[in-house]
């Protein structure tokens, strides 16, 4: 089934069709959408802990989670660190755990460093749902919900290959090692770029800081003035890569495919600094997260893993993909 969807996905990309995605990898029949309820009059308390608080990907995830919480009489609060950093996320997890919420939806900022605090929270009786990112050992989680990030990276490579006419130097601007999502995107892009015969220069890191991403791009351009394409692996990397190209006056010579579709990325797409965006479905991840947590709390079947779609958005199909764009407020 997964292979079929992958084949359709590749064919759709080749045909320039926008929607593309991953399948559900469920381990059980699953809770039916929207049918969960806290039941018995008990109002469950949940917290969504983002990878980083001010990031429109997580703000949009929160919108979907809040809507599902409201529909199911759940109280849900939203928290997250100022930066994508395990040392900042850990105290937040510990403070949330001390309040013993019924369930926590969390995007771990590091596959290893966040294991102990999350495991401890599960041991205290809180149901854990991993949303977006995951851990090397996610066994304490009742469910994991994410895009197929590796496939998204491959889709980015295919799109960039088309944009640069099938050959030339390409690089990846990524966040930092140890984040499951962006690591997988980088891996998928490398596979796709090498399969397409592109000259792959490897990846460089920006610590989720647009200014560093811009600096990485300008430095690479002085070393490789014939650079043809950039894959920017998340929202802030794409924002910074676009401004780096502008600073270098290279926006017509170098193409960018960025992961995510926040307001700034869409502005850059419209302006022609970025040529394609791989948009995830954060609101759906948030909604599924609440529903899976409720299923677990109600002793109902839970889907161990849910894969959500992504869409490849260009200037040409932007109008038809308005529902895939991220929001800063609900
Ligand atoms: O790309 C998303 C998210 O999926 C990733 O794990 C971290 O970066 C974002 O939040 C976008 O900035």
Image (spheres, rainbow, N blue to C red):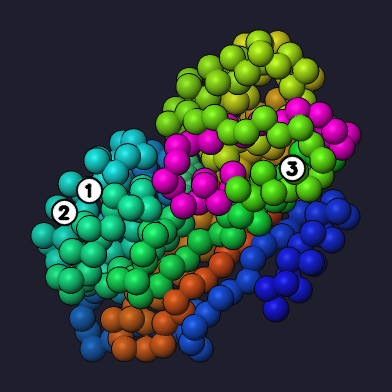
* Membership of 205 in magenta stretch: no
Element type at marker 3?
A: helix
Q: Marks 3 and 1: CB-CB under 8 Å? A: no
Bounds of the magenta segment: 163-186
Q: Quadrant of the N terminus?
A: bottom right
Coordinates of residue 278 in the picture (x, y in percent) = 65, 47
Coordinates of residue 313 in the picture (x, y in percent) = 72, 46
Q: Marks 1 and 2: CB-CB under 8 Å? A: yes
- Residue 211 visible from this viewpoint: yes
Label 1 to label 2: alpha-carbon separation:
6 Å
Residue 290 is drawn in which quadrant?
bottom left
Relative height, residue 281 to residue 84 (above, below) = below
Label 3 to label 1: alpha-carbon separation:
36 Å
Coordinates of residue 73 in the picture (x, y in percent) = 31, 74
Q: Which of the two marks, 3 or 1, is nearer to us in this view?
A: 3
- In the picture of the structure, the residue carrying the numbered disc 2 is 94
Label 2 to label 3: alpha-carbon separation:
41 Å
- In the picture of the structure, the residue carrying the numbered disc 1 is 90
Assess disc 3: are there few (<14), some (14-19) or many (≥20) residues with their C-alpha within 10 Å of its C-alpha.
many
- In the picture of the structure, the residue carrying the numbered disc 3 is 193
Relative height, residue 12 to residue 153 (above, below) = below
């Amino acid at each position: 089934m997964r292979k079929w969807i992958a084949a359709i996905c590749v064919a759709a990309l080749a045909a320039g069709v926008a929607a593309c995605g991953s399948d559900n990898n469920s381990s059980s029949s699953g809770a039916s959408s929207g049918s969960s309820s806290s039941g018995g009059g008990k109002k469950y308390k949940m917290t969504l802990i983002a990878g980083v608080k001010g990031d429109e990907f997580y703000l949009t995830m929160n919108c979907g989670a809040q809507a599902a919480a409201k529909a199911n009489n759940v109280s849900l609060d939203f928290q997250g660190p100022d930066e994508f950093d395990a040392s900042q996320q850990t105290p937040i997890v510990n403070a949330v755990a001390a309040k013993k919420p019924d369930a926590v939806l969390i995007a771990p900022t590091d596959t290893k460093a966040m294991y102990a605090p999350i495991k401890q929270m599960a041991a205290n009786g809180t149901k854990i749902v991993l949303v977006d990112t995951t851990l090397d050992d996610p066994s304490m989680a009742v469910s994991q919900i994410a895009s197929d990030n590796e496939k998204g990276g491959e889709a980015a490579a295919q799109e960039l290959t088309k944009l640069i006419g099938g050959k030339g130097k390409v690089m990846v601007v990524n966040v930092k090692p140890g984040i499951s999502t962006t690591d997988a995107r980088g891996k998928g892009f490398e596979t796709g770029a090498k399969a397409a015969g592109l000259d792959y220069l490897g990846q460089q890191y920006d610590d989720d800081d647009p200014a560093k991403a811009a600096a990485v791009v300008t430095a690479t351009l002085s070393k490789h003035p014939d650079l043809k394409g950039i894959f920017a692996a998340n929202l802030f990397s794409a924002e910074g890569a676009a401004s780096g190209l502008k600073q270098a006056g290279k926006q017509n010579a170098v193409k960018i495919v960025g992961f995510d579709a926040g307001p700034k990325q869409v502005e850059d797409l419209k302006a022609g600094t970025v040529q394609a965006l791989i948009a995830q479905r954060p609101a759906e991840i948030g909604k599924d997260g609440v529903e899976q947590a409720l299923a677990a709390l109600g002793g109902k079947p839970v889907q161990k893993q849910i894969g959500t779609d992504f869409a490849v958005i260009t200037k040409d199909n932007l109008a038809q993909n308005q529902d895939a764009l991220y929001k800063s407020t609900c």
